[in-house]
Image (cartoon, rainbow, N blue to C red):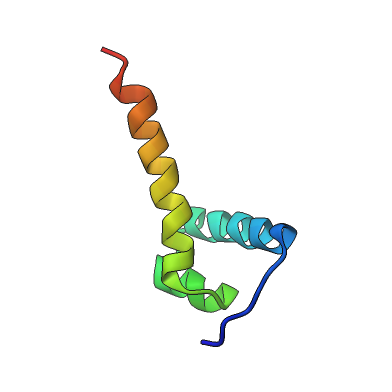
Amino acid sequence: MARISHSAEQIIGKLREAEVLLGQGYKIPEVSRRLDVTERSLMLPIELVRCSLRLKYSSVV
């Protein structure tokens, strides 16, 4: 896959579209093919959200 630069608006749009597709039950590999992005590009934001949620709720005891 060739390296392509996207604007911030395009990135946000693709992440929102990925969120919809994932919510509909599609798996990461299928979503990445549909949006023409790498799987890693989708996984990084997901991992960041999980990490922030873990930090937020781990302090609640």
Expressed as whole percent of the image width and height from the top left, the position of residue 1 reads 51, 87
**Position above or below: 50 against 29:** above
Q: Toward the viewer: 25 or 50?
A: 50
Left-right relation of 33 to 59? right
Q: Position of residue 21 (x, y in %)?
A: 54, 61
Q: How many marks?
A: 0
Give me the residue at 68% from left, 69% from top. Answer: 6
Where on the picture, by quarter, is residue 58? top left
Q: Residue at x 63, y 79 (%)?
A: 4
Residue 37 point in image, percent of width and height = 53, 74
Q: Residue furthest bottom?
A: 2
Extreme-top residue of the structure: 61
Q: Nearer the viewer, residue 2 or 24?
A: 2
Which residue lies at the image location 74% right of the left edge and 58% below the top edge?
9
Looking at the rendered image, the quarter that the C terminus falls into is top left
| Residue 30: image location, x then y, percent | 45, 74
Check the image and name the residue furthest to the left. 61
Residue 26, by quadrant, is: bottom left
Tell me if residue 60 comes above or below residue 18 in the rendering.
Answer: above
From this view, report whether residue 58 is shown above or below residue 26: above
Vertical comparison of 60 with 53: above or below: above
Q: Is residue 38 left or right of residue 58?
A: right
